[in-house]
């Protein structure tokens, strides 16, 4: 179509030398001349295409633009063209003078509420109708419906012979609206020709070697054209929720722990946390072990000795597990099953000053600069968090994968109590939008007491388990070197479950893995807790 129209313009110019008024053109495939606004837009497109086919700065055509204002009918205007003006319809519905008058209600019934209301007033003003008794009759035996005639004229020609005053009146009555339009006068250009050689868009090696570029017409660059939309990066919903949770931690004064160590040793993942070496969670069906390399570098030897001793023989008021210590079990490399492995490493570092060591990048000094917290034993309080990936040898189903994200918060201070832990969790989860919490006693090898965290789910209308928490055991903290009055509490939740709830996803595999839709990721909104 576009090519045909361009050809038509060129052929017309060829025979007439100018095209004085583009509204006279008949667009191929359309029956009437191109008087409409849309038709002129199509013609403008064709003219600009022809204009871009210049060669050596010489154009095929030139054109001038003329501005016009035209009028189009509103839906009410269209209705009047079809059925007559409201006042004419009122007049037509009424009986002749002398017959029984029509009541106001019957008039409404005959022409509709709107027409009766507007039409009555106008018909009275023009002297077309009269009041008689409780009703109305015709006052004249025939009328001229000027409104309808004018609108009809406008609809077919786009203007009114009656002139601007009549147009203004129709505009005021909202029967027509003004529209600005354009039409064009087209002339032959210096490079006029009736054949549209498809212009080249690129200069190729072939053109250069054959020399054909000399005779080619090149399409002009359009520097105003919109570029191809680039697809920007988008955060995955899990990362958006991670960002929200991270900002809650940061506003509560927590510091993020480094958690890059996906591969850990049995020592840091379990032994340091006082998880017995025979604990079922350490078995092959629950934990992924590495085969190459399969063993870790040795942990700090003094600390290692203390941990081994508390497991095997007890100490710090504990009787220990009284099972033989396996060096091999402790050195096995594995994919960490919880981020508490990183927390253990950080706590060990936090206790360095208490052990009398002076290590670089002292974390405790950064987290709590208050002088009041300083004491001779070198301990300083800390609030730490992490959000990262963990791995478990799970049977995968709609809500479980073999890898997921854990959110973990750890607080170390003197004389902390279970009430501090509960209070902290209430504050934290309220910021996440979970106002209703319950805690249930639970068991963790590394915490005592331990609490499972339940939140009221307003949509499911039930309590759902969201995480696990507790006060870290002295058997874990004392070998690290913490003074006895230092308590550490911590808690962990999954990141996937809150994300699934927030985005209304009920199968984890639509969120993670090869079935994830990139489009969904790009379109998923930010979340706010
Ligand atoms: N590591 C625990 C889990 O995997 C969470 C937790 C962290 C519990 C810290 C207590 C203290 O569920």
Image (cartoon, rainbow, N blue to C red):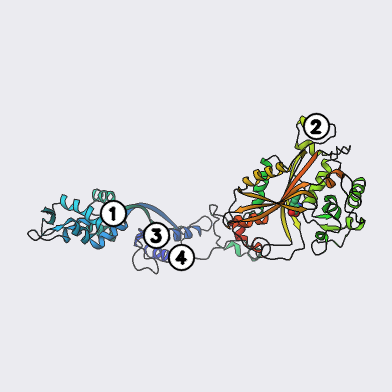
- The nearer-to-camera label among 2 and 4 is 2
Asked if residue 386 can be seen in this view, the reply is no
Mark 1 beta carbon near ligand 1 (under 8 Å): no
Mark 1 or mark 3: which comes first in sequence? Answer: 3
Badge number at residue 38: 3
- The nearer-to-camera label among 1 and 3 is 1
Q: Residues within 10 Å of mark 2 (few under 14, many from 20)?
A: some
Asked if residue 251 can be seen in this view, the reply is yes
In the displayed structure, does residue 214 sit left or right of residue 90?
Answer: right
Disc 4 and disc 1 in contact, CB within 8 angstroms: no
Q: Is 422 located above or below residue 264 in the figure?
A: above
Mark 1 or mark 2: which comes first in sequence? Answer: 1
Badge number at residue 175: 1
Q: CA distance from mark 3 to mark 2?
A: 79 Å
Task: Tell which of 116 and 396 is nearer to you.
Answer: 396
Which residue: 78% across, 32% down? 373
- The nearer-to-camera label among 1 and 2 is 2
Which residue: 23% across, 53% down? 117
Residue assigned mark 2? 374
Which image quadrant: the N terminus? bottom left
For the residue labelled by badge 2, is the local secondary structure a helix, a strand or a loop? loop
Badge number at residue 11: none
């Amino acid at each position: 179509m576009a090519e045909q129209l361009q050809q038509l313009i060129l052929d017309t110019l060829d025979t007439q030398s100018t095209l004085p008024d583009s509204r006279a053109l008949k667009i191929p495939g359309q029956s009437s001349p191109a008087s409409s606004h849309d038709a002129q837009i199509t013609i403008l497109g064709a003219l600009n295409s022809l204009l871009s086919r210049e060669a050596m700065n010489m154009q095929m055509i030139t054109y001038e633009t003329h501005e016009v204002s035209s009028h189009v009918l509103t839906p009410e205007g269209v209705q009047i063209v079809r059925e007559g003006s409201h006042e004419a319809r009122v007049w037509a519905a009424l009986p002749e003078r002398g017959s029984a008058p029509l009541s106001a209600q019957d008039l409404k019934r005959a022409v509709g509420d709107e027409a009766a209301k507007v039409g009555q007033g106008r018909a009275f003003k023009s002297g077309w109708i009269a009041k008689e008794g409780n009703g109305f009759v015709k006052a004249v035996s025939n009328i001229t419906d000027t409104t309808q005639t004018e609108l009809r004229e406008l609809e077919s020609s786009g203007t009114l012979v009656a002139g601007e005053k009549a147009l203004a009146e129709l505009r005021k009555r909202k029967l027509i609206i003004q529209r600005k339009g354009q039409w064009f006068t087209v002339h032959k250009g210096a490079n006029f020709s009736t054949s549209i050689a498809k212009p080249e868009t690129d200069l190729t090696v072939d053109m250069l070697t054959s020399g054909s570029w000399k005779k080619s017409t090149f399409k002009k660059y359009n520097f105003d054209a919109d570029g191809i939309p680039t697809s920007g990066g988008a955060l995955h919903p899990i990362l958006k929720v991670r960002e929200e949770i991270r900002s809650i931690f940061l506003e509560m004064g927590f510091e993020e722990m480094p958690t890059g160590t996906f591969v850990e040793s049995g020592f840091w993942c379990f032994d340091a946390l006082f998880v017995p070496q025979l604990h079922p969670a350490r078995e092959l069906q629950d934990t992924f072990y590495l085969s190459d390399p399969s063993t870790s570098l040795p942990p700090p030897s003094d600390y290692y000795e203390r941990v081994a001793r508390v497991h095997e023989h007890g100490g710090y008021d504990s009787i220990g597990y009284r099972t033989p210590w396996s060096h091999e079990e402790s050195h096995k490399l594995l994919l960490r099953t919880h981020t508490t492995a990183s927390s253990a490493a950080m706590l060990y570092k936090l206790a360095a000053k208490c052990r009398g060591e002076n290590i670089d990048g002292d974390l405790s000094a950064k987290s709590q600069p208050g002088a009041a917290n300083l004491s001779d034993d070198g301990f300083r309080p800390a609030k730490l968090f992490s959000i990262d990936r963990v791995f478990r040898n799970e049977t995968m189903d709609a809500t479980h994968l073999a890898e997921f994200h854990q959110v973990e918060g750890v607080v170390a201070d003197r004389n902390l109590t279970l009430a501090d832990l509960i209070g902290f969790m209430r504050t934290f989860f309220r910021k996440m939008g979970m106002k209703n919490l319950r805690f249930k006693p639970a068991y963790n090898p590394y915490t005592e007491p331990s609490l499972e965290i339940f939140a009221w789910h307003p949509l499911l209308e039930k309590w759902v388990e969201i995480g696990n928490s507790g006060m870290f055991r002295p058997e874990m903290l004392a070998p690290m070197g913490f003074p006895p009055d230092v308590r550490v509490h911590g808690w962990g939740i999954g990141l996937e479950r809150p994300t699934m709830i927030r985005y209304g996803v009920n199968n984890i595999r639509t969120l993670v893995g090869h079935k994830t839709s990139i489009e969904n990721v790009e379109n998923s909104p930010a979340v706010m807790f």
